């Protein structure tokens, strides 16, 4: 089964080609270039480098978020249009799950975090059980302070993954906390399209089919906007 | 809140130009005032001050227009926004916490979701006369108002 | 496979520059095989379709469905598409990126050429679709909610921009005055309707000619004076005839649009005037322009209402004319919210 997978939920753009279990090629760029400029040329390059054609692909995998709105919009639309043009299936995966795959076989709590601006993060926590990823805390939006508070209380080590982990580490170091929180090196912080492909393949084998129109980005509403929205709804009734 | 009386369009342009020299990347300028008060006029002069040579036209229809200046300018007009979650769909935080300065016309429509910024209210007193009031929502913007009105 | 299809250029065109999601299939640039506009798919109002939604995530949600409908209505599949055209500006970046991403993906997946199109240029080309014999040169007045331009089209892809708005677009002023008068959105068609019942000479609102010899427009002064008038009358406690205000306001706008366009045509010695954009659907504008054209021996052309507003067919037409002269784009094509329509 040949797979094209990508993730544009963070500042990085990552694209991969998989052939069943095998990672055939992976291309990640994390500099100032924008997704809108880079994504399609990267896809074209990766196919050319591997001597593959778009019609060779059996399934498409894409990260649905949460994350950067613009990035997600570009990635999700690109994959859906390609799949539609080739009449193939798309599998959408959570960006928070994708991040957790960077730390397979780690003993302890994996905490995936994605920047939600305003000192908030999108977060979910996991534990690995052999090859299975189990989600412990559902995806939510927390302030950085609240996140620290919650994780500090954990009895095990908490491993942070996601590019905003760097910011969090600086905050912790500032406060000179001797904690249970672990910050892996930079290279392990970014999402990898390989993980998107792996999860997509899993969904495919489990028959988790979805209609193209039901595959949409995960837009977790920010707490303040949600509160204001609900306030307004109530006052308008 | 500090207010000044403006007697002509030229005075509006002067104050806008002065402001353009004080702003930095990440600053947020909120313009309020009725139709015809001069919000777009203010923004045009502000943009000139940022070295933007393009004609600044009203972004009512597209909601956001982007310009390259000394600092990038993100010119919003939220007149057509009816529900706050429409702002979410625009990915507004990525502009607000991005690499440029945001000027938002009709900002009071979306006040609940706006971070601290510089509020500028343009009140129509006569055909050409305006009363322009400035309010900085935190120390940083309060200082900006002081500098502006020196 | 039908051999006939191979000799023709079948363009899949995508337009997502602002509120509307639209996809069209065009044959050789001017023949519409399908032209689907998302807000018209679900018929919610008796006027036909819903008003397209502002700043919504609907572009992403709509795009695949609209592509599918465009193909099925044209009775074609992706195999028959030889070329993709897409609006890359001007407009709202987030919206443009949806159409662009889809277009680039399809171009790559099917290995077919991609052409980027300027939305403003698209409005001009809407006329080529309905008027098969139309050829440049002509003077084109492009008036919509987001744009107001006066352009001399010398040849396909060759333009001289003679004038544009320095502040508000004409369509936008219609909408804002409409709002001030308490009318439904969009204000343009409402004011057009109401004007028929009012006296266009009732109030003389000022028209901004700007400096001598300028073909630029400025509507913010007119907007202010209508608003000032409404405020003054309200303060005096006078009853306002919204029909008269609508008619007088519309008259001021269309008079200046028509006058500058006609003057321009005479100066450039061009015998043909073409209208484009949403405001080209305004009956007052069409009527006055027709009268003046007839007076000066000029011909007038404009598109039907559906092609005046944003749609992908017009983009497909631009795309086709770019394609046949090899003005193609590559996969680095990016959205430009401020894409200018300039002298080429």
Image: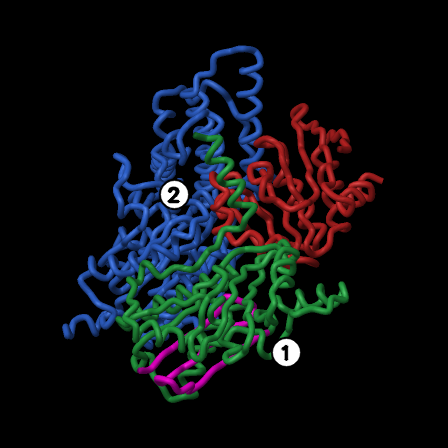
Chain colours: A green, B red, C blue
Q: Residues within 10 Å of mark 1 (few under 14, many from 20)?
A: few
Query: Measuring 47% from the left and 46% from the top, which residue is drawn there?
Result: B86
Quadrant holding the N terminus of chain A: bottom left
From the top left corner, tell me how far across and down residue C183 is, in percent: 41, 28
Residue at which label 1 appears: A185
Q: Quadrant of the rendered structure where residue B16 is?
A: top right
Q: Secondary structure at mark 1?
A: loop
Which dot, 2 or 1, sits closer to the camera?
A: 1
The correct choice, above or below, for C87 with respect to A58 in the image is: above
> Is residue C341 at least partly visible in the picture?
no
From the top left corner, tell me how far across and down residue C57 is, in percent: 42, 52
From the top left corner, tell me how far across and down residue B11 is, in percent: 75, 36
Q: What is the chain letter for disc 2?
A: C
Residue extending farthest front? A155
Magenta residues, dominant SS class: strand
Bounds of the magenta segment: A1-30
The residue nearer to you, when weighing C104 against C219, is C104
Query: Measuring 24% from the left and 63% from the top, which residue is drawn there?
Result: C27
The residue nearer to you, when weighing B144 against A66, is A66
The correct choice, above or below, for A159 with respect to C318 in the image is: below
From the top left corner, tell me how far across and down residue C31 is, in percent: 24, 59
Residue at which label 2 appears: C278
Residue extending farthest right? B150
Query: Measuring 81% from the left and 39% from the top, which residue is drawn there?
Result: B149
């Amino acid at each position: 089964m040949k797979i094209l997978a990508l993730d544009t939920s963070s500042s990085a753009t990552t694209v991969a080609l998989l052939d069943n279990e095998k990672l055939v090629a992976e291309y990640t760029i994390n500099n100032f270039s924008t997704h809108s400029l880079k994504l399609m040329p990267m896809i074209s390059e990766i196919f050319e480098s591997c001597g593959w054609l778009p019609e060779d692909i059996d399934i498409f995998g894409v990260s649905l978020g949460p994350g950067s709105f613009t990035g997600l919009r570009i990635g999700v639309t690109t994959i859906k249009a390609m799949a539609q043009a080739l009449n193939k299936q798309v599998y959408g995966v959570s960006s928070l799950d994708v991040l957790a795959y960077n730390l397979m076989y780690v003993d302890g709590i994996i905490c995936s975090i994605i920047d939600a601006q305003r000192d908030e993060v999108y977060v979910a926590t996991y534990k690995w059980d052999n090859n299975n990823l189990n989600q412990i805390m559902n995806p939510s939006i927390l302030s950085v302070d609240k996140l620290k508070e919650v994780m500090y209380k954990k009895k095990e080590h908490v491993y942070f993954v996601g590019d905003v982990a760097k910011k969090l580490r600086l905050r912790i170091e500032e406060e000179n906390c001797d904690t249970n929180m672990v910050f892996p090196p930079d290279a392990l912080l970014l999402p990898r399209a390989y993980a998107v492909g792996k999860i997509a393949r899993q969904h495919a084998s489990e028959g988790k089919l979805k209609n193209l129109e039901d595959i949409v980005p995960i837009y977790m509403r920010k707490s303040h906007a949600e509160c204001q929205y609900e306030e307004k709804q109530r006052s308008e009734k | 809140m500090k207010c000044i009386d403006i007697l002509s369009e030229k005075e509006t342009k002067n104050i806008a130009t002065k402001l353009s020299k004080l702003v930095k990347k990440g600053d947020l300028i909120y313009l309020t005032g009725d139709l015809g008060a001069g919000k777009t006029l203010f923004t045009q002069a502000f943009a000139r001050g940022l070295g933007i040579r393009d004609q600044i036209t009203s972004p009512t229809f597209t909601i956001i227009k982007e310009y390259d200046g000394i600092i990038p300018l993100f010119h919003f007009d939220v007149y057509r926004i009816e529900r706050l979650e429409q702002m979410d769909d625009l990915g507004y935080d990525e502009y607000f916490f991005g690499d440029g300065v945001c000027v938002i016309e009709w900002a009071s429509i979306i006040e609940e979701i706006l971070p601290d910024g510089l509020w500028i209210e343009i009140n129509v007193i006569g055909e050409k006369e305006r009363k322009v009031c400035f309010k900085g929502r935190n120390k940083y913007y309060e200082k900006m108002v002081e500098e502006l009105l020196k | 496979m039908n051999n006939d299809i191979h000799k023709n250029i079948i363009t899949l065109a995508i337009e997502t520059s602002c509120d509307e999601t639209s996809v069209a299939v065009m044959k050789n640039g001017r023949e519409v095989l399908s032209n689907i506009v998302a807000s018209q798919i679900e018929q919610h109002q008796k006027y036909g379709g819903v008003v397209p939604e502002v700043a919504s995530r609907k572009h992403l949600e709509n795009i695949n469905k609209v592509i599918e409908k465009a193909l099925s209505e044209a009775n074609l599949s992706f195999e028959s598409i030889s070329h993709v055209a897409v609006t890359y500006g001007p407009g709202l970046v987030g919206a443009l990126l949806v159409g662009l991403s889809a277009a680039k993906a399809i171009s790559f997946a099917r290995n077919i050429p991609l052409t980027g199109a300027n939305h403003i240029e698209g409005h001009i080309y809407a006329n080529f679709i309905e008027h098969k014999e139309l050829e440049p040169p002509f003077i084109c007045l492009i008036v919509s909610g987001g744009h107001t331009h006066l352009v001399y089209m010398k040849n396909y892809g060759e333009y001289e921009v003679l004038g544009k708005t320095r502040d508000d677009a004409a369509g936008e002023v219609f909408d804002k005055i409409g709002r001030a008068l308490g009318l439904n959105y969009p204000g343009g068609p409402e004011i057009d309707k109401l004007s028929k019942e009012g006296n266009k000479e009732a109030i003389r609102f000022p028209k901004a000619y700007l400096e001598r010899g300028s073909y630029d427009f400025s509507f913010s002064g007119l907007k202010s004076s209508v608003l000032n008038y409404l405020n003054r009358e309200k303060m005096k406690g006078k009853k306002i005839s919204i029909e008269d205000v609508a008619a007088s306001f519309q008259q001021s706008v269309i008079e200046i649009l028509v006058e500058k366009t006609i003057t321009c045509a005479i100066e450039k010695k061009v015998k043909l005037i073409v209208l484009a954009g949403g405001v080209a659907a305004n009956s007052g504008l069409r009527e006055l322009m027709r009268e003046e054209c007839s007076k000066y021996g000029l011909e007038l052309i404009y598109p039907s209402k559906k092609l005046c507003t944003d749609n992908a067919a017009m983009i497909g037409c631009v795309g086709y004319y770019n394609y046949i002269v090899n003005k193609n784009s590559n996969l680095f094509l990016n959205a430009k919210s401020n894409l200018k329509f300039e002298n080429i």
